Image (cartoon, grey):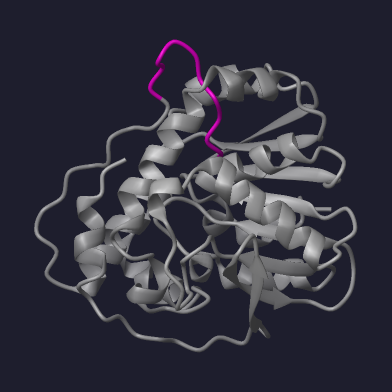
Amino acid sequence: MKHGLILVLLSFAGVNLANALDLESNQLRVNGHSLHYYQAGTKGTPLILLTGYATTSNFWNSDFVECLAANHRVYLLDYAGINSSESTNLHKLSIKSMARDVNKFSQKLKLKQPALIGWSMGGGVALEASFMAPKQYRQLYLISPIVPVTNQQQLVFPFAAHGEFKSESDVLNYVFNNNLYHYESASLMQLDSKFIVSKNTKLFPNLEFMPAQGEAIYQWTNSPDTLNRFRNAKTPAVFFIPQDDVIIDQKVAESMMQHYPQAKIEPIKDSGHAIAWQYPLEMCHKID
């Protein structure tokens, strides 16, 4: 994972745009620290959303979340130290530590058989949480997830080169161009209004999280122990794989998904890495 982009991301203030989604912002103390989360929806089965590398819960597409909240109780979870006034020990950050927080979060809120929706790095966190507590979750929905690999396979592509960012629009255009299929900058204003909070300092965690998250991803995806537990997993999972991903090598990822015991693999045509941004309502309707 490359980290230089975040230096630029954090240098722009951004604009906070309101949206119609009814969200409650809360803090919950788990495993000795406070986790920030949003809650939406008052009925139906619970869903916990786990975001990806270098993003916060504010990065989710609000149309996707609002659609889910019509029939579910939806929890958008931040990882320790993100959207929180508390600091966290990044030397101890790992996919396992994030997964332990997810499990404790679910237990403390007494959520009955929630499903986990994990995007990118969040897919790995969801998998790890289910490895630790296979009976706790009824289903995993994994959107462009990281997965364990063998023999030092390269799962993540290097980020695309870019010129100097001179404005916030330059930054967001770069982010969307890398995450959406056939992205056009003319759609930026419309897309920008769909963030939970459209402010760069709220969309992306502090700079020091980037190398820690990158190292956590590398260690987890290249661990033989992770691969062994992946091959013996108990929780049913749907893997949504975009056919035009420039972030994760989906040929490598799909070859590994074949080893998951209860896998349903669903390719998504004409989509980049952020499938829930590319097709928010269509993806919502795939979630039970």
Query: Does residue 40 appear to the left or right of 223 in the view shown?
Result: right
Quarter holding residue 135: top right
Query: Does residue 178 appear to the left or right of 116 in the view shown?
Result: left
Name the spot of residue 178 as percent of width and height, x first: 34, 48
Q: Nearer the viewer, residue 46 or 102?
A: 102
Q: Nearer the viewer, residue 281 or 15?
A: 15
Query: Does residue 17 appear to the left or right of 256 in the view shown?
Result: left
- Quarter holding the N terminus is top left
Name the spot of residue 40 as percent of width and height, x first: 72, 77
As drawn, 264 above or below 79: above
Name the spot of residue 197 as percent of width and height, x first: 47, 79
> Does any portion of residue 173 appear in the rendered image?
yes
- Residue positioned most to the top: 151
Q: Is residue 38 magenta?
A: no
The number of numbered discs placed on residues in the rendered structure image is: 0
Provide the major secondary structure of the magenta segment: loop
Q: Residue at x 37, y 57 (%)?
A: 176
Query: Does residue 178 appear to the left or right of 284 in the view shown?
Result: left
As drawn, 274 above or below 68: above
Q: Residue at x 65, y 71 (%)?
A: 29
As drawn, 251 above or below 270: above
Q: Nearer the viewer, residue 156 or 66?
A: 156
> Does any portion of residue 120 appear in the rendered image?
no
- Residue positioned most to the front: 32
Q: Is residue 149 magenta?
A: yes
Q: Residue at x 81, y 35 (%)?
A: 235
Q: Nearer the viewer, residue 148 or 286?
A: 148
Name the spot of residue 33 as percent of width and height, x first: 57, 67
Q: Residue at x 70, y 67 (%)?
A: 75
Instruction: Write the start and end of the magenta stretch as one range.
Output: 145-154
